[in-house]
Image (spheres, rainbow, N blue to C red):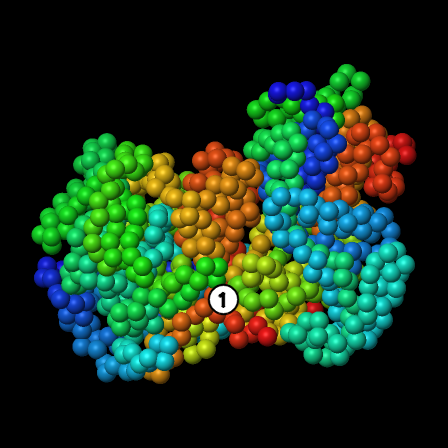
């Protein structure tokens, strides 16, 4: 392992990523890289929260990073409760802040 | 012990809790002992149904109707929330044939004091907007209610504690203490002895083992059931909704796997999906065929659930007696031994009436209903006491 | 060499000789070793690329030309990957990535059926049949709650590492690393190498406690050297190492702005008046790892309580579980690290071969002896490590009544205490039933240890009743779509 300290993670691994693409978070355009998870894409954009809790409406985002804690649940392309830390980001994805159980649309 | 005990209740499930509540309220000095914790057995695995709809006229329905009114009282008397909700039951029939059977059943139930209203096919979705289309019809039972069973048991025990009852969790009963004449004088636990002239067997599915410690036979068998728990959802399902076939599954004596869809929402969000019944001993292995059938039947009844994820599956062991009636009352074979177990899948619903009957029997009061059909020695072919 | 009847059974396209669950270090080592010896293997893994949590690497699209820069021992993984690729090409290993096994079921003939979900959104089902099962299901990080730990910017230490390794992202620029256990050092180093500043590494135990077992240390000079190397590297990167301290509060409105670090005594009780603020924009926190036992429990395998306070699969010298036909390797058998996982994976595969064929060739037998020796040495070290970093009984004193313990269901420490003190709950299950702690999406993976500790403080580990005190039971190892379950129903 090289002992050098990089300025960014990408520099550390000498990344030469494929071309970036665009997706949206609450309608706002953000940039994604092929292979990144939704959560990584959001972190890259400086966004740490994309859900509010069911009981107290508190903000949450990624916590465990490996799909075990389900704190990072997001609504992606209208489908609620997707694990953002596992789901790969794809061009054009529309991520929206998920409120509570994410199923308000079902509640008639 | 600070004072001499009148009653030792074995089992801190909802039935033991109700016995403790009514016994201590009538001035008896009570201890409740359980090898585990509060609601550690079948109570904790229950959905908390307080149903009259699934019972045919007879002694169990009488017990259920009495319990229904007692639960209503308790929901007002108890100091903390037990999620009591008179949500009503909706029994649905897929075919004209099962609708006819359902309607006949409802008619006889009405004669026994049950409120039951026919719901025509076109009105079903007014009651439950997400029900599948093309069902033949149904029946609405407004008296059906629900509690959160573990909270209910814990709250009954806490109230009993305020009347002086003592709770001894984590203490396993290993023997029944007897006088030379055979009458009970308490229980021995792994740690100590609790002396009392009355022992109540509220050990649920394990009630047969406790009876055996007193030298008597009570054929309680486990009847396994699985429940599926979905991800949290808005209140999509308002009633307890189940298929008309459920009633015949409940009253069947078969050991083989039976499933019929029972679907309901909860105040916390998840939808609970039951109900399976099979007699496989205390096998705790997940049965893929059983949960697959539950899933298929629930999705057929509520297509909206098909895309919803199941977070958890759990099982419980209903305490089953061969005639589907509980054992409630004194055991004539062992003076001082009372039974309050074997309620199968209806223990939450029948708990208060059971507790009241037991408290009255211990105190020598006139019972509020005829306990004859629940006689604990009714299965004993060697015994001629009636 | 004697052959069992089993070996003569023709290769069955529908039934593998061995199913390995998990393609982390243990699972990879097991799968390639078994295939080397001629066994037909199916390897199921929830991730898209092999490597598990330890050898997580950026997916191809990110174009990492030096992925090894984020890893220790990358050549070992590169070699295993190459062997996997070769066996995959020859058909000896059927590799099923993106397959999350949700339960294992024993068929009437003794075969195992592994039910998995797959597809982009996990909505397709898959079932695999195998004669034998080898569980290398790994671990997830253990967490302890503390005031403020739900504030955005607080992430799990392993999670920060995982997001960095696979997504090349950081949760902040100035990250405090806290908790307990050797993983924290590796995380802090990775973060600094990737450009973050780590003002402090907060360790609740004291490293001096390792000295309690000098003979174990002497037998593991590599571990000692690694510790020294890490310490020097951390110092070089400007990371202050603070032991016998814990984060007892987190500050910030929308996200982390600072943390309060307090001294703790030997029992991890915070010492009043010792709190000091450290400014940061993220906190990476963890208290060791916990084995993922869902499938082992589903298969009926016995478990044991470990020195670190977790439960793990009970294994014999041959890595056999208590259930015939089921082996386990790596973290599932007790937290021990990558070196042990690699060793156990290989050893378990040799054990499978031995049992199938009634013996192994001489070279393999010699190899097994060496592996056994390594395993004994490494297990001794991991037991010591587990005991050193096991949370002290006083940790719960840093909780306030309104600290959320269960993140999913938002259940506070106060409610759990009420359930214990007023309602007589004395075990995890009863606390769960009375408060909903552990009933949410994660099914208690995050709060389970803390809830158990809080309940045990009242019930002294009682828990007879229906569910004797053991590992949490999660009959579904992950959420499964209702329609996916329904598809498994046989026509009535």
Measured along the vertical axis of the image, is residue B196 above or below residue C403?
Answer: above
Measuring from the top left, give residue B368's x and y in whole percent: 85, 40
Circle 1 residue: A101
Question: Where is the N terminus of chain B found, in terms of image quarters?
Answer: top right
Q: In the depicted view, which residue is nearer to us: C169 or C254?
A: C254
- Horizontal arrangement in the rendering, residue B199 relative to residue B62 (left or right): left
Question: Where is the C terminus of chain B found, in terms of image quarters?
Answer: top right
Q: In the depicted view, which residue is nearer to us: A100 or C72?
A: A100
Measuring from the top left, give residue B180's x and y in whole percent: 77, 16
- Horizontal arrangement in the rendering, residue C136 relative to residue C302 (left or right): left
Element marked by disc 1? loop
Q: Residue at x 80, y 25 (%)?
A: B335
Measuring from the top left, give residue C407's x and y in whole percent: 42, 55
Q: Residue at x 64, y 46 (%)?
A: B152
Q: Residue at x 17, y 61 (%)?
A: C196
Measured along the vertical axis of the image, is residue C272 above or below residue A62?
Answer: above
- Horizontal arrangement in the rendering, residue C319 relative to residue C486 (left or right): left
Measured along the vertical axis of the image, is residue C188 above or below residue B168?
Answer: below
- How dense is the environment of label 1, judged by Cα within 10 Å: few (below 14), some, or many (20 and up)? many
Residue A71 in view (yes/no): yes
Q: Residue at x 28, y 46 (%)?
A: C247
Measured along the vertical axis of the image, is residue B173 above or below residue B112?
Answer: above
Q: Numbered disc 1: what chain?
A: A
């Amino acid at each position: 392992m090289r002992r050098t300290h990089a300025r960014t993670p990408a520099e550390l691994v000498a990344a030469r990523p494929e071309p970036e693409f665009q997706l949206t978070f609450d309608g706002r355009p953000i940039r994604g890289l092929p292979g990144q998870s939704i959560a990584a894409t959001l972190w890259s954009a400086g966004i740490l929260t994309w859900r509010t809790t069911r009981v107290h409406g508190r903000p949450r985002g990624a916590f465990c990073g490996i799909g075990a804690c389900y704190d990072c649940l997001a609504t992606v392309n209208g489908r609620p409760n997707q694990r953002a830390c596992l789901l790969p980001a794809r061009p054009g994805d529309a991520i929206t802040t998920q409120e509570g159980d994410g199923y308000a649309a079902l509640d008639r | 012990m600070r004072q001499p005990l009148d009653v030792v209740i074995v089992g801190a499930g909802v039935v033991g809790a109700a016995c403790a509540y009514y016994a201590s309220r009538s001035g008896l000095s009570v201890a409740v002992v359980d090898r585990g914790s509060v609601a550690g057995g079948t109570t904790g695995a229950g959905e908390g149904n307080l149903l009259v709809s699934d019972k045919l006229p007879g002694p169990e329905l009488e017990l259920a109707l009495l319990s229904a009114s007692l639960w209503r009282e308790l929901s007002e008397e108890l100091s903390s929330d037990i999620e009591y909700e008179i949500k009503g039951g909706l029994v649905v029939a897929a075919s004209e044939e099962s609708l006819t059977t359902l309607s006949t059943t409802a008619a006889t139930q009405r004669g026994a004091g049950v409120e039951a209203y026919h719901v025509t096919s076109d009105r079903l979705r007014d009651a439950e907007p997400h029900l599948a289309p093309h069902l033949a019809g149904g029946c609405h039972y407004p008296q059906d209610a629900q509690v959160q069973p573990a909270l209910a048991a814990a709250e009954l025990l806490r109230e009993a504690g305020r009347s002086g009852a003592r709770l001894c969790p984590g203490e396993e009963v290993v023997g029944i203490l007897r006088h030379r004449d055979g009458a009970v004088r308490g229980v021995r636990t792994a740690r100590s002895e609790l002396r009392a002239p009355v022992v109540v067997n509220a050990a649920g599915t394990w009630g047969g083992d406790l009876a055996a410690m007193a030298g008597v036979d009570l054929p309680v068998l486990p009847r396994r059931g699985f429940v599926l728990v979905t991800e949290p959802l808005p209140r999509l399902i308002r009633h307890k909704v189940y298929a008309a076939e459920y009633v015949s599954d409940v009253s069947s004596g078969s050991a083989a796997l039976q499933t019929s869809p029972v679907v309901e929402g909860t105040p916390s969000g998840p939808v609970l999906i039951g109900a399976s019944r099979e007699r496989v001993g205390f096998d705790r292995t997940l049965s893929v065929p059983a949960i697959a059938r539950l899933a298929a039947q629930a999705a057929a009844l509520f297509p909206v659930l098909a895309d919803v994820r199941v977070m958890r599956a759990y099982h419980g062991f209903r305490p089953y007696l061969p005639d589907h009636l509980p054992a409630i009352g004194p055991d004539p074979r062992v003076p001082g031994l009372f039974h309050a177990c074997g309620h199968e899948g209806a223990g939450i619903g029948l708990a208060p009436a059971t507790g009241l009957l037991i408290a009255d029997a211990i105190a020598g009061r006139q019972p509020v209903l005829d306990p004859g059909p629940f006689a604990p020695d009714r299965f004993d072919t060697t015994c001629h006491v009636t | 060499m004697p052959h069992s009847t089993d070996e003569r059974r023709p290769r069955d396209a529908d039934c593998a000789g061995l199913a390995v669950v998990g393609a982390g270090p243990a699972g990879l080592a097991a799968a390639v070793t078994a295939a080397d010896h001629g066994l037909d293997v199916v390897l199921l893994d929830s991730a898209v690329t092999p490597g598990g949590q330890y050898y997580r690497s950026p997916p191809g699209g990110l174009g990492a030309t030096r992925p090894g820069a984020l890893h220790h021992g990358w050549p070992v993984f590169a070699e295993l990957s190459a062997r996997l690729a070769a066996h995959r090409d020859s058909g000896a290993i059927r590799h099923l990535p993106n397959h999350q096994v949700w339960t294992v079921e024993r068929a009437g003939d003794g075969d195992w059926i592994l039910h998995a979900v797959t597809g982009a959104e996990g909505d397709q089902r898959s079932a695999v049949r195998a004669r034998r099962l080898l569980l290398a299901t790994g671990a997830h990080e253990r967490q302890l709650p503390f005031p403020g730990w739900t504030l955005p910017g607080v992430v799990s230490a392993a999670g920060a590492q995982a997001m960095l390794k696979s997504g090349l992202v950081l949760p902040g620029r100035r990250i405090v690393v806290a908790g307990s256990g050797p993983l924290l050092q590796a995380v802090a180093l990775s973060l600094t190498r990737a450009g973050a500043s780590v003002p402090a590494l907060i360790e609740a135990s004291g490293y001096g406690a390792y000295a309690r077992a000098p003979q174990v240390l002497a037998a593991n000079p590599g571990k000692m050297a690694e510790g020294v190397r890490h310490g020097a590297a951390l110092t070089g990167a400007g990371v202050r190492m603070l032991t016998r301290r814990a984060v007892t509060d987190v500050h910030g409105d929308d996200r982390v702005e600072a943390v309060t670090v307090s001294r703790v005594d030997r029992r991890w009780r915070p010492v009043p008046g010792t709190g000091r603020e450290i400014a940061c924009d993220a906190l990476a926190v963890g208290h060791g790892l916990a084995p993922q036992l869902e499938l082992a429990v589903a298969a009926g395998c016995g478990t044991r309580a470990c020195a670190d306070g977790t439960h793990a699969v009970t294994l014999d010298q041959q890595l056999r579980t208590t259930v015939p036909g089921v082996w386990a390797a790596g973290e599932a058998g007790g937290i021990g690290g990558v070196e042990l996982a690699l060793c156990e994976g290989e050893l378990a595969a040799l054990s499978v071969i031995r049992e199938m064929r009634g013996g192994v060739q001489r070279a393999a037998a010699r190899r097994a002896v060496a592996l056994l020796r390594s395993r004994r040495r490494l297990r001794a070290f991991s037991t010591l490590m587990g005991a050193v970093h096991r949370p002290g009984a006083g940790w719960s004193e840093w909780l306030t009544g309104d600290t959320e313990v269960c993140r999913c269901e938002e259940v506070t420490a106060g409610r759990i205490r009420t359930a214990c003190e007023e309602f007589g709950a004395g075990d995890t299950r009863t606390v769960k039933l009375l408060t909903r702690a552990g009933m949410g999406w994660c099914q208690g993976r995050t709060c389970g240890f803390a809830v158990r500790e809080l309940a045990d403080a009242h019930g002294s580990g009682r828990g007879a009743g229906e569910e004797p005190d053991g590992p949490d039971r999660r009959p579904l190892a992950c959420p499964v779509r209702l329609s996916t379950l329904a598809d498994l129903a046989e026509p009535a």
